[in-house]
Amino acid sequence: MGSHHAVEIKEERYAPSSRLTNIIRLLIGIGIVTVAAGVYTDGHRFWANYLLNNWFFLGLSLAGVLFVSIQSVSNAAWSLGYRRIAEAMGAYLPWAFAGFAVLMISTSLHWSHLYHWAHHGIAEEFLEGGQPNPEYDPIIASKVPYLNVPFMAARMAVFFGLWILLYRAIRKHSLLEDQEGGLLRIRRIKTLASIFLPVFAVTWAMSTWDYVMSVDTHWYSTIFWVYHFAAAWVAALSFMAIVAVLLKKAGYLPHLNDNHLHDLGKFMFAFSIFWAYIWVSQFLLIYYANIPEETIYFQERLEHFKIPFFVNVGVNFVLPFFLLMTRGSKRQANYLMAVAILLIAGKYLDLYLGIMPGTVGGHAHFGWMEIGMFAGYTGLFLWVVTRALASASIIQHRHPYIREYATHEVM
Amino acid sequence: MTKKYILGLFRDEVPLLHAVHELRKEGNKIHEVYTPFPVHGLDEALGYKRSRLPRAGFLFGCLGGTLGLSMQAWMLGVDWPMNIGGKPALAWVDFVPVTFELTVLITALGMVATYLVASEFIPGNEPKIPDPRISSDVFCIAIPAEDASSSVGSRLRELGAEVQEKEVEL
């Protein structure tokens, strides 16, 4: 019955510890060395990893903005302790834009060969002399009006433009709330969030087709973007759980307690099941229909990636399902953080299985390049997030729902 | 079986919760507390153990899953095998949706039934409540008269309750 005690919530400034700063430097260092070595030794595998990591962290960062939007639109108070963390994740969006811009340039200049549809002359039926083109692929030719570099670059510019614009606006009003209090800024954020939500749905769907699904150019699945949404969402929730628990351990966020962790844990639990639901939906329909051009997707994965294919379902569904089922499990900070780390590893594996078979195929293996590049990107992401987190109060202390947040209780 | 109870009727949940804490601290045995809506912290104040309903749910889930899986295996694999898209008759992947749905269905129905039976919410049963106002605006603490100390009535009044003694079945 905390509502009967006066709760005072103050502005709270975060400063990254020197230990964390050193870890981030080390991770970025590992990343730079790996990238240099990767480009030199195995360019194709490097670009596959490049796409994987850019996509993974784009998903994390966008899901952060999505979290802020959903919580604002639904007038939620329980999540206030996580909202600045989610906002800080959005600060990575311009970096993700830079990453994909480089990918686009490398595709158009044929430095990278991730996208089959970008191969020179693949959509031309006849060679210049009039003889039939042996490279001609009629299925890809029918997709080229959509899958071509200028149109994809234009889509990328528009999508990232919208995301960054909306994110910056939400962040601006959120920071002004810290000075002004009151309802005006909350209403503005709500309006922006209601614009972001439908924009996100459409742009995210098209981005999954563009960057991930078009790796397997012949193949398509209409549920693919939902699947990737579920993965990015669970990864982002897990990331927020880890950051919140670490902040709590370092003595920040005094009002964040096991009730708030419980609700975030429920979110992770529910969306792990949702992920599995979408996974089964995609698999089952393709299995039922038994159309060769669809089954090839799973054929490839079961042939070259048999063990990770099944481990994927175990790590992303079976384990979290049992580990997060009970009430107590979601209310223990260390335990929840351990499951969150497991889920992030699981989502990496999930994306590995989404991208590697269509790019590197049978030559793919998990080794120093995969670990090093993921470490580097983690370092970069952490650097951006901690900087954004340190640039403002880590709690919206003048938010109108702040008392409801502090006294939040899960029955 | 009716029994004599001392009833403390409250108008607000805050003094009620306070009274429950105080009475239990002073060693009084509370039979039950009746409220029009769930009161935060009341379960802990009464020292209730966690509900055993999830265990019933787990058992019903196992039953539903087994039923769903064995039903399909028997129908499609044993009793009437059919060639569907060239798949084997016992294609376990096909059975996932129905097994899942039946697990959820039997768990939900089973838990509702268990709850209704355990709380004696059976159609035609007279509700066992101390006072009809507890479904509207009154909060009630029921203390069995046989276990109660003689001072409990005045203590309840002190804590802000209207006190009644009633012969009821609870």
Image (cartoon, grey):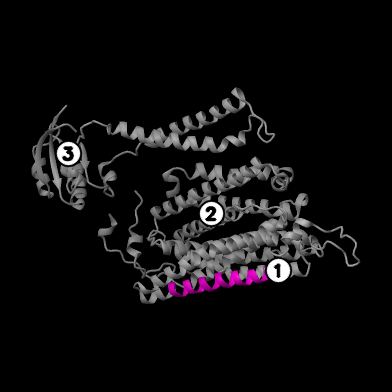
| Contact? badges 3 and 1 (CB < 8 Å) | no
Q: Nearer the viewer, mark 3 or mark 2?
A: 2
| Contact? badges 2 and 1 (CB < 8 Å) | no
The residue segment tinted magenta is: A152-174
Q: Mark 2: give few (<14), some (14-19) or many (20+) Cα within 10 Å.
A: many
Q: Nearer the viewer, mark 3 or mark 1?
A: 1
Q: Position of residue B84 (x, y in %)?
A: 65, 34
Of residues A177 and A121, the one nearer the viewer is A121
Who's the residue at 28% across and 50% down the image?
A: B40
Circle 2 — which element? helix
Who's the residue at 80% across and 57% down the image?
A: A137
Q: Disc 1 is attached to a residue of which chain?
A: A
Labels 3 and 2 positioned on one and the same chain: no
First in sequence: mark 2 vs mark 1: 1
Is B61 magenta? The answer is: no
* Residue designated by label 2: A234
Q: Is residue A79 left or right of residue A138?
A: left
Q: Residue furthest front?
A: A130
Circle 3 — which element? strand
**Amino acid at pointer 3:** Ala
| Contact? badges 3 and 2 (CB < 8 Å) | no
How far apart marks 2 and 1 lie (CA) works out to: 27 Å
Q: Disc 2 is attached to a residue of which chain?
A: A
Q: Is residue B26 left or right of residue A53?
A: left
Q: Position of residue A331 (x, y in %)?
A: 42, 49
User: For residue B166, what is the image quadrant?
Assistant: top left
Who's the residue at 88% across and 60% down the image?
A: A132
Residue A104: mark = 1
Is A153 magenta? The answer is: yes
**Amino acid at pointer 1:** Met
**Amino acid at pointer 2:** Val
How far apart marks 3 and 1 lie (CA) works out to: 73 Å
